[in-house]
Amino acid sequence: MKVLFIGDYKSNEGPSNVNKNLKNNLPNNFLFIKSNNFFKRKIEIFFKMFISNVVVISGFNNKLNLFCKLAKLLNKKLIYLMHGCVKYENEINNLELPNKIVNNEIIFLKNMDLILCVSKNYMKWVSEYYPNIKEKLYFLNNGIENENFNLDLTNSRKSDKIIIAVFGGNRNQKNNLEVCKAIKVMIDSGQNVELHVFGRFYENNEDLSSYTFLKIHGHVNQDTFYNELRNNINIGICNSEVESFGLAIIEALFCGCDIIMSKNTGASSIMKLSENDIINDPHNINEIIEKIKIVHENPNHNRILQSIDINSITWKAQSEKLIKICENVFYKNNKQNIKEI
């Protein structure tokens, strides 16, 4: 069995980093596109698709439907690794994408034999948002390389000052504006709180500039990010409306922070959380304040870290799972069997 893997694995964006890590752990029967030249790349895709049995597409691209049509004509099995939902993210983040792109995603999803969401929780959300593709859904968690971290269970960050980090800049979907409002209430009431914001800032999204207490880091490289988490942050918060996985909040945990996340954060499916670790309504300022106070007084880092099966979430483990899924789709053509992987 040969598998063609199509996706960006050369840039520094989230899906690209996922693809690079999978690529580094997949065997030789997985084929990748090497050419950077526009025309040579197309020829390479056509040729490698012809000699492959299964095509895995990681991340949506508006131009991919042409290759999907070709794959169908050649009777190839199509698997999609779904990092996000174009239709939903276009609406909530004011991306103003053309209708053609949004409609193309719907056509694209219908062409897939199997759709792998990047977490079990995200799979549940997608099944509710797109009920017509529910039967095609399964999941392949994003992985993490635990050797990059010192998983020290004796680490304690409890102090008088609460230093919080949020991720994703000012992207509406992240609901960082609500966290800003919560922190302002806490500061106004005399509490010693500091808020750090990591990630890109976008013109059409939430305006956080009126909150003068913010420490805005923007988009930083991985080493700088880890350094800040290890040395300067007590609590990491993911307050997203919907988060397909949430690698940043896992990295915060692995760097020694306590964490709080919204109920629709995909990463929550790989750990055991208590009610006090979860924000049920990401727009409820009082709930956000309450959860911050509880976690500050009752650090959850050690408890949550101990609940994670570290070996099962490595990139090696996820790559091995992808291999089994591809084999199952090609040889057995039965999604029911995949649920046993």
Image (tube, helix red, strand yellow):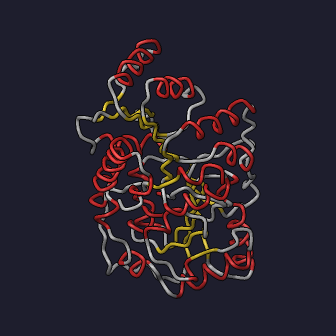
Relative to 198, is 310 on the left or the right? Answer: left
Residue 310, x across and y down, in percent: 31, 67
Q: Quadrant of the N terminus?
A: top left
Q: Is residue 261 left or right of residue 17?
A: right
Give residue 207's position: percent from left, percent from top: 75, 52
Residue drawn where x is 32% and y is 40% of the image: 23
At which x and y percent is residue 6? Answer: 42, 32
- At horizontal 56% and vertical 53% (from top left) the residue drawn is 135
Q: Is residue 169 above or below residue 16?
A: below
Q: At 41% from the left edge and 34% from the top edge, which residue is drawn?
A: 55
In the image, 211 versus 300, the foreground residue is: 300
Residue 100 lies in quadrant = top right
- When the figure is inspected, residue 129 is found, relative to residue 80, above or below; the finding is below
Give how far across and how far down residue 189 sits, in percent.
Answer: 73, 82
Task: Give 263 or 50, whichever is nearer the viewer.
Answer: 50
Is 204 drawn above or below residue 335 in the view shown? above
Q: Nearer the viewer, residue 101 or 169?
A: 101
Q: Quadrant of residue 210?
A: bottom right
Question: For the C terminus, which image quadrant?
Answer: bottom left
Count of picture labels: 0
Vertical comparison of 248 with 323: above or below: below
Q: Residue furthest left?
A: 28
Relative side of 283 to 37, left or right:
right
Q: Residue at x 40, y 71 (%)?
A: 256
